[in-house]
Every structure is written in C-alpha cells, then in structure tokens.
C-alpha cells in the first residue's frame, strides 16, 4: 500500500509498525524527554522505512541485535517536519531508535509551578492531534498506522504520570529521586491519540468504569461536575453497542489546555473551563465519550476525512443529550452549533475547499484549517441521513458501521461505499454527493426548531427596535438560553445598550465561560470600556482556543483595543499551548 496520507511521510508498502515499546525519561530542568523506541513490524521487511519526526534529535538507530543501522534525517518541511529514513537489514521485524525531544516540541507544554492550580509542582502534558505525535516520538504519524504500545515513563518522585492506556504500575527507578510508571495499551490506536500528563495528579472513582484525575485543588469541583458520567456511558452504549476500551477515565487539565476536550482512549483530557458549577457544559464530556466509537474505534484515514470522526460524534453527543435531557435540549445545542458553523464558513469564504466535508488539505497545516465545519456540517449530514431513513434504520446502520470498521481507519470513499450497500438509495435522496464533495451548506440542511429557540431568537432580533427581555424572567434563563440570545444579538451595540445588559445581568461576573466569551466579544466590538478589564483577566485565566481566537480577533480588529490585544498577548503568551500561540500570532499579524 502506498502513502495515502498527505500529512505524513508514512508509506505502508515499506512496512507497518504494529507495536512500540517506549522508555521515556522526563527532564523538567531541560524541558525535554529522552527516549528509546523499540518498533515491532507486522511482517519482516528490508531496506528503507520512513518515519515522521518534528524537531527530534535522533541519537542512534539499531537492529534487533543492537548493531548500528544507517539512518537519515531529512531537512525539515514547514508542515510535515523531517522524514527519518532507517535502512533495515534483510528480514527485519524489529528495530530501535534513540531520540530526544526539543524544548519547543509542538505537542508538549511544560508548565512552571505557578501555572498550575497547586502552585508547587511543574506539569507536563501532550496534545498530539492532528500531526504532533511526531514531535514526541518517531512514528508513522498517520491515522492509517494504528499500533499498540508499552511505555515506561520515569519522572521526579514527587510527581505522578497518567497515560491514555491501561492504569499504570509504579516502581522505583534506577536514578535517585526518580520514579517509573509502566503502562500498556492493548487496543490499537492511531498516533494522534498517544497521550500522557505528568504532575501533582490525584484520582477519584466516579463509577465502575470511570475515574476522575486532576490536581488535588480541582478535584471536588471536577468530581461534582462530571458525576453523571456512568449514565452517559450507558446512554452511549444504547446508540453504538458495547464500550470496548475497558475504562473511560478522564483528566481535568490545567487552564492552558487548548481544546474543550481530547478523546484519548481510556483517558480523555478535559478543559477546566467546563467547571461551570451547574453541569451546563458537560456535553463536551458526552462528545469525547462518543469518540470512543466514532474516532477511536473507527478512525478517519487522514485529515481529509476528519468529518467522519467529528460529524458522527456530534450527532451521537446530541443523541445522548436528547436521551438525558429531552428534545428541546438537543434543539438548543444544534442551534448553537449552527451559529458556529456559519461563522466558520464565513471566515473561509463562499466556495472554500475547507467548507466541504471531504477536503483536500495537502500542503496546508491541519491546525490552520481546523474549524467547526467537519463537526457541525458533518452533524447535519448525519442528522439528515437519520431523517431520510428513520431512527430505527439509522441505529441499525450505525451499529453495523461501528462493528464492520472497528479498530480500522477508513476513507470517505469507503464510507460512501458502505452507505450505498447498507442503505441503498438513501445517498441519492439526501443529495450526499453535494454534501460531501461540494462547498458551503446545502439547502436541505435540517433545522431543529423549538418554541424556546424561537422566543429567544425573536427577542434578540428585536433588540434594534427596542425589544428587551423581561429582567425577572431572564435572570432564570439556562446557560443554553443565554448562549442562544447573545449569539443572535447585534455584534456591535451602543454603550448604553451594553450597560443595560451588564447592569441587569452582571455579565462581566459570569462564571460560565461560554456566556462570558459571547458577551465579551460583543463588548469589545462595541468598545464598551467597563468590560476591558474582565476581558484582560479572562484571557489570562484560559488557554482554550475556542475563547482565545474570537476575543483576540475582536480586540485586534477594533482600533480602540488593538494595543490592548498586543499587551494581553505579551503578558500571557508563555502560558498558552504552542498550538494556540501559532494561531494567535497569525491573528495579531493580520
């Protein structure tokens, strides 16, 4: 099989790595990991075998007997990193590479004690999606190349390692003051799901299959917020069938984590911005749980097929929400998602390649075209398929799809072939070719209506004509109500209008990050100075790109706040993840 992934040097015709044995030593003083990787190939090969790396120092390559073998590290490509080519002796099934990561590894964030909740210990975590695993370990960094692994990680003795793998065993290391943790991942994963964290991390069981991990100072809030996790697992199994990863544990991260969540199997990562104190944002946990089937079990073959992961997962997340909270909750969530989708499509421009479901991302950095399009346009495609064939047939189809493709990575073409075979005629009825292969949003996109949604959007659309919500009623709105209302309001208002909102509803003091971000975006666009200090403090508290990008874009886009944008970024950039910094620097350079 030739190289089919435009974002990897992997060529599976050279050989396939099916298992890795990793020995990693974490050096906080020098912000690097010193590693040894033993590769097991699925069959004996000889000659050139290419691996992906980014900013790795390669300290040697060896055959199964420990003899040196030739290797070549090519000049770095700005998107792909550097190809590592090892030349294997005849009949090789094993080889080893020794390496050291860079302090600037794109997947790793090294936090000083002051950047953690406890303030006493350093912290390290990985974020390998989409193509950042190659900055931590040399690997075939393509979703096409799934592998199992064993990993020993050695860290300072006052720290704990958690890993997206079977729960680890702790042992003394050979070095004084260091402790080793050993993990096994028995199910095959794509490289972007390789994940770990090192810090002052504690644990609390929340159900028969779930443990919450986080810093001690965050445990009480985290355990309360996600206490319903077992109900979510049971609701997800009704949709997809049995959960095949044994455990669904999760780690509540430091604030600099750049995403809402990351579905690392056996150990999902979650942003602390979900700790709203009212369980109003736990749909993110439902989303990451759904990835246990769509994404982790059945994986996109490349970033070009990313919608297969996210579209089905958002659909499942909202089915779980419907099961737990009712159809109205699902409709409000879909409306919020549609707002984000239209914003993303507008930012790309009409007819953009990146508003298709199956895209051609060759030559472009996946982090640069990452957006809500595969999530929300993908959701609407799957929802339309459900409308077309009915829920009963849809549920049968999804279970069969998961069972047929489990522990594999597939292309959009393979999905289309399966769809046409299992649900003949459905693709033609719903216009699947336009949805998948054409840009923009088709006219037959499902609309999720509710009386609550209509009322909230009606209030917002009447704002310019003097319509105002009843204060006594609005103070009792749900967080979803507020998101709908704020998203539908004009993006620029008078100072008087902003004052009315803030005085009556204390929006500057809002604890729900979704509401606060929507409000601050309006306030900055409106040059509402009483919100500037809260915007500045909020951007110092969070590292999630969902909030950073719109707020820095608003600050930079307003002449009155452009200097403030530069000041806030300069003060906080060291606390943002490398992935976030790259994106924000492009915003501020625009």
Image (cartoon, grey):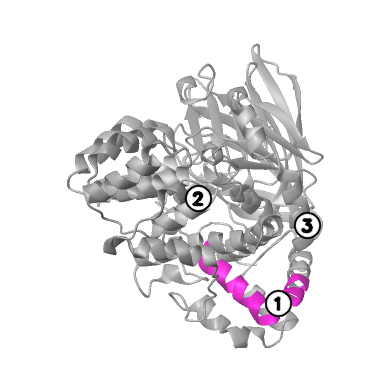
- The residue located at (75%, 55%) in the rendering is 235
- In front of the other: 352 or 338: 338
SS class, disc 1: helix
Task: Measuring from the top left, give residue 61's x and y in whole percent.
Answer: 61, 39
Q: Nearer the viewer, mark 2 or mark 3?
A: 2
- State whether residue 322 is above or below residue 245: below
- Upstream in the sequence, badge 2 or badge 3? 3
- In front of the other: 233 or 12: 233
SS class, disc 2: loop
Figure quadrant of residue 364: bottom left
Q: What is the crowding at mark 1: few (fewer than 14 residues within 10 Å), some, or many (at least 20)?
A: some
Mark 2 highlights which residue?
477
For the stretch drawn in magenta, the main secondary structure is helix
Mark 1 highlights which residue?
418
Whether tag 3 and tag 1 are in contact, CB under 8 A, the answer is no
Res 237 label: 3
Marks 2/3: CA distance?
32 Å
Horizontal arrangement in the rendering, residue 589 relative to residue 183 (left or right): left
Q: Quadrant of the N terminus?
A: bottom right
Region of the chain picked out in magenta, as a range:
373-396
Q: Is residue 494 visible?
A: yes
- The residue located at (36%, 43%) in the rendering is 504
Marks 2/1: CA distance?
44 Å
- State whether residue 408 is above or below residue 400: above
Task: Measuring from the top left, give residue 313's x and y in whole percent.
Answer: 63, 60
Q: Is residue 590 magenta?
A: no
Figure quadrant of residue 414: bottom right
Horizontal arrangement in the rendering, residue 227 relative to residue 507 (left or right): right
- State whether residue 1 is above or below residue 113: below
- Upstream in the sequence, badge 2 or badge 1? 1
């Amino acid at each position: 099989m030739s190289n089919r992934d435009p974002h990897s040097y992997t060529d599976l015709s050279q050989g396939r790595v099916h298992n890795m044995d990793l020995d990693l030593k974490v050096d906080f003083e020098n912000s690097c990991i010193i590693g040894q990787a033993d590769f097991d190939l699925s069959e004996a090969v000889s000659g050139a075998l290419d691996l992906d790396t980014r900013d790795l120092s390669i300290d040697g390559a060896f055959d199964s007997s420990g003899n040196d073998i030739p290797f070549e590290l090519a000049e770095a490509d700005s998107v792909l990193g550097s190809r590592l080519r090892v030349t294997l002796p005849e009949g090789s099934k094993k080889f080893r590479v020794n390496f050291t990561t860079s302090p600037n590894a794109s997947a790793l964030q090294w936090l000083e004690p002051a950047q953690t909740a406890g303030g006493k210990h350093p912290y390290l975590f990985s974020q390998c999606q989409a193509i950042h695993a190659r900055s931590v370990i040399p690997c075939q960094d393509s979703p096409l190349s799934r592998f199992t692994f064993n990993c020993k990680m050695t860290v300072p003795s006052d720290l704990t390692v958690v890993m997206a793998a079977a729960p680890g065993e702790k042992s003394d290391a050979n070095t004084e003051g260091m402790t080793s943790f050993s993990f096994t991942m028995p199910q095959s994963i794509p490289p972007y799901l390789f994940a770990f964290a090192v810090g002052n991390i504690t644990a609390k069981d929340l159900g028969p299959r779930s443990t919450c991990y986080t810093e001690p100072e965050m445990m009480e809030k985290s355990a309360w917020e996600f206490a319903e996790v077992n109900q979510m697992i049971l609701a997800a199994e009704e949709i997809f069938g049995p959960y095949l990863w044994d455990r669904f544990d999760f780690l509540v991260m430091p604030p600099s984590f750049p995403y809402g969540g990351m579905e690392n199997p056996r150990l999902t990562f979650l942003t602390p911005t979900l700790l709203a104190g009212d369980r109003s944002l736990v749909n993110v946990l439902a989303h990451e749980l759904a990835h246990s089937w769509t994404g982790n079990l059945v994986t996109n073959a490349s970033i070009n097929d990313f919608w297969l992961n996210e579209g089905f997962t958002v659909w499942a997340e909202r089915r779980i929400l419907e099961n737990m909270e009712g159809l109205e909750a699902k409709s409000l969530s879909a409306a919020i998602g549609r707002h984000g989708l239209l914003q993303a499509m507008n930012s790309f421009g009409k007819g953009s390649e990146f508003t298709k479901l199956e895209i051609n991302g060759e030559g472009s950095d996946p982090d640069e075209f990452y957006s809500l399009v595969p999530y929300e346009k993908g959701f609407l495609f799957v929802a339309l398929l459900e409308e077309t064939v009915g829920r009963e047939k849809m549920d049968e189809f999804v279970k069969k799809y998961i069972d047929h493709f489990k522990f594999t990575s597939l292309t959009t073409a393979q999905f289309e072939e399966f769809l046409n075979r299992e649900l003949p005629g459905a693709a033609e009825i719903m216009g699947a070719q336009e949805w998948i292969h054409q840009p923009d949003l088709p006219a037959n996109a499902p609309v999720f209506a509710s009386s609550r949604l209509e009322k909230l959007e009606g209030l917002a659309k009447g704002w310019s004509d003097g319509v105002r919500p009843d204060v006594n009623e609005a103070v009792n709105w749900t967080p979803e109500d507020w998101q709908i209302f704020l998203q539908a309001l004009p993006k620029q208002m008078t100072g008087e209008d902003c004052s009315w909102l803030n005085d009556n509803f204390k929006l500057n003091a809002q604890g729900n990050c979704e509401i606060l971000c929507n409000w601050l975006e309006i306030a900055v666009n409106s040059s509402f100075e009483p919100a500037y200090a809260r915007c500045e403090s909020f951007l110092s508290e969070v590292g999630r790109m969902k909030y950073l990008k719109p707020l820095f874009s608003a600050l930079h886009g307003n002449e009155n706040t452009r200097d403030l944008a530069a000041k806030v970024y300069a003060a906080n950039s060291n606390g943002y993840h490398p992935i976030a910094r790259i994106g924000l620097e492009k915003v501020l350079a625009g």
